[in-house]
Image (cartoon, rainbow, N blue to C red):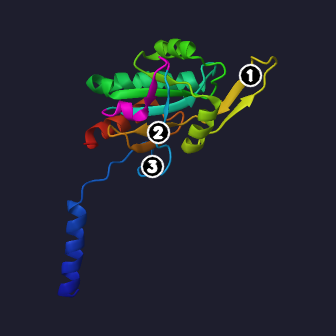
Amino acid sequence: MTRRFFWTVLAAFALVACSPEQTKFNSIDITGADYAKGFTLTDHNNQTRSLSDFKGKVVVVFFGFTQCPDVCPTSLTELVEIKRLLGADGDKLQGVFVTVDPARDTTELLKAYMTNFDPSFVAFTPTPEQLAVVAKDYKIYYKKVEGKTPSSYSMDHSAGSYVYDTQGRLRLYTRYGMGAKALAQDVSALLKTTP
């Protein structure tokens, strides 16, 4: 081995050893993605709000509807469990729910629905036009599935969640069914690594 090769290898090893360790997440790391940039919609208190209003917290955004029989209540229940698992940092988690069924999900219904899970969670009810724009930006799928009567329809929709760090930057996409413990670890890591 030549002396020059030896010093080159040693220098490369030193650079790797001194580099800050990359945070490993359980969710899919989408830091720097050029979509899901946020929105401004009406919340369940009839106030116009934006995702940027929640800076200082890790924000988890989920799309669903109040009459959803399984995915939506399971996801929101997991968010409640994540908040509990975070302990003293639980108040630094913000759950955000965006309805894909604005025809039935009124602000009053959404307020009652969120209170059943956690009163600090916020639900948004877009107009059908706003929903189309937000869904496109977030790359989510939603479709009305007709029922036996006009009001008994269901909604097919994407089941994952988007996670933003305390600076409001999109960081993670978490698939449905990942579990509260795994996402709690990711939220905790974001709280520790975000300035």
Q: Of discs 2 and 1, which sits in the foreground? A: 2
Q: Quadrant of residue 56?
A: top left
The residue indicated by pointer 3 is 30
The answer to which of marks 2 and 1 sits earlier in the sequence is 2
| Residue bearing the label numbered 2 | 38
Residue 194 percent location from the top left of the image:
28, 42
Residue 157: give x, y in percent of width and height: 64, 33
Which callout, 3 or 1, points at the residue further toward the start of the chain? 3
Amino acid type of the residue tagged 1 in the rendering:
Tyr
Residue 47 as seen in the image, left or right of residue 193: right
Q: Which mark is residue 39?
A: none
Q: Disc 1 marks which residue?
A: 153
Q: Is residue 50 magenta?
A: yes
83 on left or right of 110: left
Q: Is residue 109 above or below residue 65?
A: above
Residue 54: % across, % down: 36, 31
Q: The residue under label 3 is which amino acid type?
A: Ile
Label 2 to label 1: alpha-carbon separation: 28 Å
Q: Secondary structure at mark 1?
A: loop
